[in-house]
């Protein structure tokens, strides 16, 4: 048998066919790289978003726990109200209240907004004359509004103690509206009784 007759019907790849195959493989490789890169970027973005929402949930849970342990001190010698809002220069505010702790009794506690973040304040000695310990609850906050529910029928007041009420009294609920830079306005209502 002749060598020529064995290979007579077969033909090799031309250079053009080879280049077309390489281009197709390159396009497929580029598309798969972009898909994998997009998936990785999406995952990182979702993880960052999840971390933000988790921090927000933890901050509201901490606020709720502290506010629900709010205690009325009745009439105290220093006549400190059970709950009060103090406006700070520059648009910030501090919500100061007495929190009942099992072993230590009533402790002065607060939530402070300084124009950028919400902090938990704890006075170790219970006197507002001392410097409080500060723990940041939430960063990147544009504004915080406090409202208090009281009366029959319930009405929301922007200040506490309400006009004409006993300074040792507590509201029925507290509404906290946080304007976050990333998530907009988020409002939570905490019942106290």
Image (cartoon, helix red, strand yellow):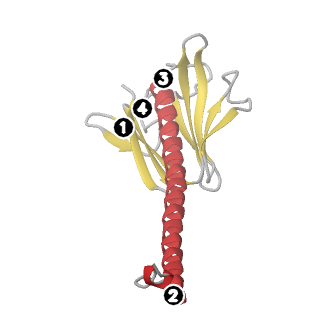
Q: Residue furthest front?
A: 1
Closer to the chain start, of discs 4 and 3, is: 3
Tell which tag, 3 or 1, sits nearer the viewer: 3
Mark 2 nearby-residue class (10 Å; few <14, some 14–19, many ≥20): few
Label 3 element class: loop
Image side of residue 168 versus residue 94, left or right:
left
Closer to the chain start, of discs 2 and 4, is: 2
Q: Which residue was labeled with disc 1?
A: 149
Of residues 22 and 104, the one nearer the viewer is 22
Tell which tag, 4 or 1, sits nearer the viewer: 1
- Alpha carbon of mark 2 to alpha carbon of mark 4: how far? 95 Å
Say which quarter of the image contains residue 5: bottom left
Residue 165, numbered circle = 4
- Alpha carbon of mark 3 to alpha carbon of mark 2: how far? 83 Å
Closer to the chain start, of discs 1 and 2, is: 2
- Alpha carbon of mark 3 to alpha carbon of mark 1: how far? 17 Å
Image side of residue 60 versus residue 105, left or right:
left
Can residue 167 be seen here? The reply is: no
Q: Which residue was labeled with disc 3?
A: 69
Q: Are marks 2 and 4 in contact (CB under 8 Å)?
A: no
Q: Are marks 4 and 3 in contact (CB under 8 Å)?
A: no
Label 4 element class: loop
Residue for point 41% across, 35% down: 164
Residue 113 percent across, percent down from the top left? 59, 46
Image side of residue 147 versus residue 29, left or right:
left
Residue for point 50% across, 64% down: 38
Residue 134 percent across, percent down from the top left? 68, 35
- Quick one: quadrant of the C terminus? top left
Q: Which residue was labeled with disc 2?
A: 14
């Amino acid at each position: 048998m002749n060598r020529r007759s064995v290979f007579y019907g077969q033909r090799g790849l031309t250079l053009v066919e080879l280049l077309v195959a390489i281009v197709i493989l390159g396009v497929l490789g580029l598309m798969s790289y972009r898909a994998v890169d997009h998936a990785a970027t999406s995952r990182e973005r979702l993880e960052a978003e999840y971390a933000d929402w988790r921090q927000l949930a933890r901050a509201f849970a901490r606020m709720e726990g502290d506010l629900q342990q709010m205690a009325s001190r009745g009439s105290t010698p220093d006549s400190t109200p059970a709950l009060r809002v103090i406006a700070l220069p520059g648009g910030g505010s501090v919500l100061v209240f007495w929190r009942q702790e099992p072993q230590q009794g009533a402790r002065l506690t607060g939530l402070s907004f300084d124009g950028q973040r919400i902090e938990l304040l704890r006075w170790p000695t219970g006197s507002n004359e001392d410097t409080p310990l500060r723990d940041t609850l939430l960063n990147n906050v544009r504004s915080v509004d406090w409202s208090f529910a009281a009366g029959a029928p319930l009405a929301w007041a922007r200040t506490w103690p309400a006009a004409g009420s006993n300074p040792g009294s507590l509201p029925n609920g507290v509404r906290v509206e946080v304007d976050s830079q990333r998530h907009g306005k988020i409002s939570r209502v905490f019942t106290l009784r």
